[in-house]
Amino acid sequence: MLQLVADGFIIGSVIALGAIGVTLVYSILRFANFAHGELLTWGAYLAWTALIGIVAVWGPAEPLGPFSFGWPLLVALAVSAVATAALALLVDRLLFRQLRRHGNAITLIMASFGAALVLRNLLQFIYGAVPEYYSREIQVAIRLVPRDVLGGLRITPDQLFVLGLTAVSVVGLHIFLTRTTVGKAMRATSVNPQLARVTGIDVDRVIRATWIIGAVLAAVAGVFSGLTVQLRPQLGLDLLLPLFAAAILGGIGSVYGAVVGGLIVGLAESLSVPLVGAEYRAATAFVVLIAILLIRPTGLFGERT
Amino acid sequence: MTALRVVDLEAGYEPGLPIVRGTSLAVEPNEIVAVLGPNGAGKSTLIKAIAGLVPVSAGKVLLHDRDITGRAAHHLAHEGLGFVPQTENVFVNLSIEDNLDLAASILKVPKKQRLRDLYDLFPDLARQRRLLAGRLSGGQRQMLAVARALVGEPKVLMLDEPSAGLSPKLVGIVFEKLLDVRATGVTIVLVEQNVKAALAIADRGAVLVEGSTRIVGTARDLAGDPQVAALYLGQHRGGS
Amino acid sequence: MPDLIGLLSYGTFFLVFATIFALVVLGLNLQWGFTGLFNVGVAGFVAIGAYTSALITAPDYPDQLGGLGLPIPLGWLGAMATSGIAAFIIGVAALRLRHDYLAIATFGVAVTLQLVALNAKGLTGGPFGLQFIPKPFAEVIDDNLAWNVTYLAVAAALLGLSYVALERLVRSPWGRVLRAIREDETAAESLGKRAFRFRLQAFVIGCMLMGLGGALYAHFVGYIAPEDFLPILTFQLWTMLIVGGSGNNRGAILGAFVVWALWTLSGNALREIVPSEYQARAATLQVVLIGLLLMLILLLRPRGLLGEETVVSRHMRDEAADTAEE
């Protein structure tokens, strides 16, 4: 039982970080971005490329303490965050920005669906379909709770790293949104774009900031997924439904809602495994989604429709 | 020098379908001008076009003799044009203080001093500065909307139906406040359905019919003009 | 002299697929083109139809449910019924909400059905899918080409029938209400519950056509597997509609033929050019190419090859302007 909860929080961390991006893009650009999952995949793979590059130049590094990875992965994560943000800005410039000028939200969804396929297949073309790993080091899981208490709890250092960095990211984002001018401008634009403009806010800048934050968190989430599971071209596609479910569950537009929603969806997935079997795990997100649409479509923290 | 000059302006949401059709208007510094007219005359579209929110297809807009035609709304806020939309005119998810503070950061005005001045002008807001703007009552919300538009010390303040949705008593209070704002040297243009209240504080008025200026005159003249009354009567008859 | 029979056989094969796609795209057009409903789970609804019809008509499957051995027309009707019921459930959950929610919910349908198809071995045969799906008239027509032509005639007849029916529907008062709902959110809101009912009807009818398309596919190929109904199928169908011109039934049909031709040709070209060991990788490029085609159309010719015929009336635009004014 405890183990399932812990596993749920770990997958929930990945979902939460991805769902923040979905909810931010939704609240500022006003469309459900079906390409967001691909930002996770690209983030994961770009970090992998950076990692190979770093190791090729500086040689392999010893793992850091109990973790399966050394400093190169941390650098690779930073490189990937920048590159993924650049990718998101590029897609926006080439595609979404053009459509924003004269299209409506629904053309944007359509375009994002197309962009997702293009990005995924391009990635598969470049990297191939074989799963990859950041590290093949074997990790010893730490026993936190003995087996006779609620089934016990074992966790790997990497998983603790994921939980810790997720918490840091969320706190960092909170400070950004509540203390900085750009953050406040983003919140202002999300509730009232027209008023934002007459207040002097350059909405194009806000949009760029939104893509950058969403993409950076997506890269982090992608790397976490690669670290705790493996790298596959379908990584982002498989996470897309949980991302949407988490964002809607939390109340679309609410960053904290997305975090809570992500953790709940992660837990639901994990706890459903003993009930329905691992093969239907991914359908849990769909059940959560339909339930929330039927019961409370504004989500847990959403006030706006 | 005129504070705001509009010359033969044509503007609308869709190309080829202008709602404002050849409107001209000149507003002198520190004047209060009321833009009046029957429903659907294009009043609202006119000031939105001036504020850069509706595409302009022909004509010119000059702010203190500088051509600002077709400039983006966010640039105009920096150029000294304040705009108070009719509805949804505060950021409901931010506190009163953050509403003002954000505008000050964006417009790069000395924050502390400007906010103190505004709180002096709107003491009600100062008392509850941590309150979420979404929790404010109609009158207070309108005050915050005006205060927010004033943060950048605009030369010209434009308001879209500031009386909408307010009780007659609150209309009186808000309009009194506009006189205080004018006393600080700001030029005011307001679009109004409430002709009586608007002409009570305005120096001059302009009546818009079918997208173009039909009558311009002093507030006193317009208040007694049977033609103006007829326009509204006609509208009421047609509207019922 | 090239193998004429082979060429003809290939031609009819191509045309049958294009015709089935066109039928599905007509359903999508009713949803998106005429009602503005965004369905991202088309592949899922096609799959429901295909599996339903297979389970109803195939001979008894060992070790699993279904295989009732009933007549094929019953299978096709059943396909439409199950797709329609699924659409009804999803529609009730998502159609009252913002259009994005329908997109997300239908995407969820496709993902979940993919899981069911892969894992519910007792119903869907798992990754190997269902085989021995009966081919109509197969006992009377031996010749492969003749059978292909016959099936093409049946599919074309169904397509023609659907086209005529849809054209009448969208020109009826019902169709005008649909367009009004699509054009103008305020009008839709003033209709309230009725707008929801209109949307639901359009959504269900559209999905029934998708189900029928799935059934036609199943009985043409003779076997189905989960990989036949991947998101790429949804994407192809959408590209067909956008390329042809949404809101125009003839455009929807034209788009299906044009895009399917492009898809087939680009696939053949890649197979010719690329050495066999790289083909799996090159296949991804084919998707990239079609994706770019869709985006270019969205950017450069958003109305598609044949745009919508009916222009929004002047009167309605004036009303929109008035609403904006207030």
Image (tube, rainbow, N blue to C red):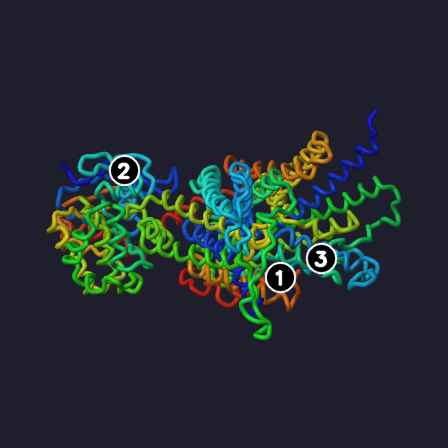
- Same chain shared by disc 3 and disc 2: no
Residue matched to label 2: B9
Residue type beneath disc 2:
Leu
- Name the spot of residue A51 as percent of width and height, x first: 53, 42
Residue type beneath disc 1:
Arg
Q: Is residue C217 left or right of residue B223?
A: right
In the picture, the disc for residue C79 is: 3
- Name the spot of residue C65 as percent of width and height, x first: 78, 64
- For mark 1, does the 10 Å Cα neighbourhood hold few (<14), some (14 to 19), or many (20 or more) residues? many
Image quadrant where one finds the N terminus of chain A: bottom right
In the picture, the disc for residue A281 is: 1
Q: Nearer the viewer, residue C155 or B153?
A: B153
Q: Nearer the viewer, residue C124 or C304?
A: C124
> For the residues carrying marks 3 and 2, which lies nearer the camera in this image?
3
Q: Chain of mark 3?
A: C
Q: Nearer the viewer, residue B11 or A60?
A: A60
